[in-house]
Image (cartoon, rainbow, N blue to C red):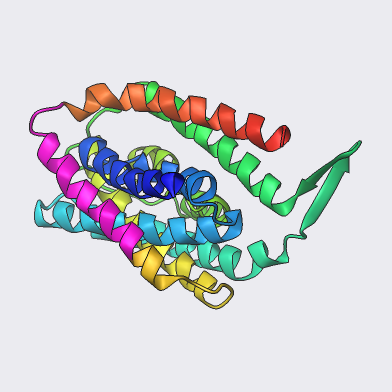
Amino acid sequence: MNTEIFGYLGALIIGIVLGLIGGGGSILTVPILVYLLFINPVTATAYSLFVVGVSSLVGAIRNIQKGLVDFRTAIVFAIPAFITVYATRRYLVPAIPDKLFSIGDFLVTKNIGIMIFFAIIMLVASISMIKERKAKAVADAVVVFNYPLIVTEGLIVGVITGIVGAGGGFLIIPALVLLAKLSMKKAVATSLLIIAIKSLIGFIGDVENLDIDWSFLLIFTGISVLGIFLGIYLSNFIEGKKLKKGFGWFVLIMGVYIIYKELTM
């Protein structure tokens, strides 16, 4: 019962972090669902897609109202990503065998494999948060899309999102700056719309495969959304950029902990 309370508290923290620093908080969704609410990793990654999708949509709507979203760029990036994330959830994840391989007496199962892969993504994301992004703002640049690179990036992000249920903003934002020549501010805003589209479409692939506990999922997501608005309010008093590096270190420690936990169970 205590862990359940902490699990719902974690949902609120996810939203607060999203509201304060504009991203990254959703990477905590899977660990909270697995280790505090004892949900199977495959189901947890599915639920995470829904939470990430709805949370990102809330942020995207706010950015649309501010005129920060580049819709053409969002559509071009989102199409390969959402096709791949749907296919990954609908066909690839169910096709992964329950027993992957063994090293001596240690059997690496599907659940362990997913959590270790997720932890590796956490480590990469944490480095992205800790390291200061130094991207030059581009004013009214003419966007010439590099379609092969965009499709490749979309495929990679789609597969990663599909397997681990994370938004992948740390991969999308640099791509938007480098490939679409967007300013950092517009890249962050546009990435939320891309993440919302591909996460929610990816979740549709799970609806056909999994038995979804809608009452739990809607309550958990609702608490996260409340947390976003609380985080937005707190951002008037706390500078999100200062928190981002500290949160990055926390994600790094969590990633290392998950690898340790999964390999020593």
Q: Nearer the viewer, residue 75 or 191?
A: 191
Q: Find out whether residue 227 is within the magenta segment.
A: yes
- Find residue 257 and report its image quarter: top right
Q: Is residue 255 above or below residue 200?
A: above
Taking depth in this image into account, of 132 and 54 the one nearest to the observer is: 54
Q: Residue at x 25, y 59 (%)?
A: 71
Residue 8 location in percent, x, y? 35, 50
Q: Residue furthest right?
A: 104
Which quarter of the picture shows residue 208? bottom right
State left or right for residue 38 relative to residue 217.
right
Q: Residue at x 33, y 45 (%)?
A: 9
Quadrant in the picture for residue 231? top left
* In the depicted structure, whether residue 153 falls above or below residue 88: above
Q: Residue furthest front?
A: 1
Pick the front one: 199 or 132:
199
Q: Residue 183, how many percent across, how many down?
A: 24, 38
Where residue 178 sits: x, y (%)? 38, 38
Q: Is residue 246 above or below residue 193?
A: above
Residue at the image position 27 percent from the left and 54 percent from the top? 223
What residue occupies the far bottom of the structure in this picture? 208
Magenta span: predominant SS is: helix
Q: Is residue 243 magenta?
A: no
Q: Which image quadrant: the C terminus?
A: top right
Give the answer, above or below, for where 172 lies relative to 148: above
Give x and y (percent) for residue 158. Answer: 51, 56
Please say whether residue 254 is visible from this viewpoint: yes
Write down the region rendered in magenta: 219-238
Taking the image as drawn, is residue 74 in sight? no
